[in-house]
């Protein structure tokens, strides 16, 4: 029903910036919430930031003040602006979408994009 394609990952020096993009296609009108997660090697996947269909946003304490989540509805694209990057931000970042059709909720995931912060 929903396809998510991510881009924007790469290698950045500490203190640098990156902007991740997630292009959504399919049953776009059914999406109720979108989010960014990340997972470092040997660690559990954690929520980074999310945004609801109404525009409400939330950011985890570990990235608050540095990361910003936003959405361009006209382009069906989700963004994560990452500033003041630290080595501990190194992880695979995943885009997700929650859809609600009738009484059924479903989660969709992108393929993930690698972000490496190193000097």
Image (cartoon, rainbow, N blue to C red):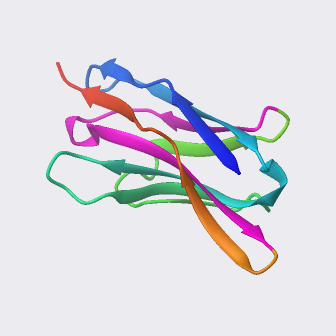
79 to the left or right of 114: right
The quadrant in which residue 9 appears is: top left
Looking at the image, the residue that sits furthest to the front is 1
The quadrant in which residue 91 appears is: top left
> Between residues 98 and 69, which one lies in front from this camera angle?
98
Looking at the rendered structure, the number of numbered marks drawn on it comes to 0
Residue 59 spot, x, y in % from top left? 50, 57
> Between residues 51 and 6, which one lies in front from this camera angle?
6
> Does residue 79 show up magenta in the picture?
yes
Quarter of the image containing the C terminus?
Answer: top left
Indicate whether 108 appears above or below 19. Answer: below
Residue 111 spot, x, y in % from top left? 45, 38
34 to the left or right of 81: right
Secondary structure mostly seen in magenta is strand
Indicate whether 6 appears above or below 93. Answer: above
Residue 116 spot, x, y in % from top left? 27, 28
> Does residue 14 show up magenta in the picture?
no
Residue drawn at the location 33% of the way across and 30% of the way down: 115
Residue 68 spot, x, y in % from top left? 55, 44
1 to the left or right of 109: right
Indicate whether 15 appears above or below 88. Answer: above
Residues rendered magenta in the picture: 75-101
The quadrant in which residue 12 appears is: top left
Indicate whether 11 appears above or below 51. Answer: above
Residue drawn at the location 85% of the way across and 35% of the way down: 74
Residue drawn at the location 60% of the way across and 40% of the way down: 4
């Amino acid at each position: 029903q929903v396809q998510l394609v991510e881009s924007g990952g790469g290698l950045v020096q500490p203190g640098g910036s990156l902007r991740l993009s997630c292009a959504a296609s399919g049953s776009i009108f059914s999406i109720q919430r979108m989010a960014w997660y990340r997972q470092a090697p040997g660690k559990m996947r954690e929520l980074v930031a999310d945004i609801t269909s109404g525009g409400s946003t939330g950011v985890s304490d570990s990235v608050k003040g540095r990361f910003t989540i936003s959405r361009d509805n006209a382009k069906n694209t989700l963004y994560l602006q990452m500033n003041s990057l630290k080595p501990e931000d190194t992880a695979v970042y995943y885009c997700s979408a929650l859809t609600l059709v009738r009484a059924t909720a479903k989660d969709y995931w992108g393929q993930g994009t690698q972000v490496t912060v190193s000097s």
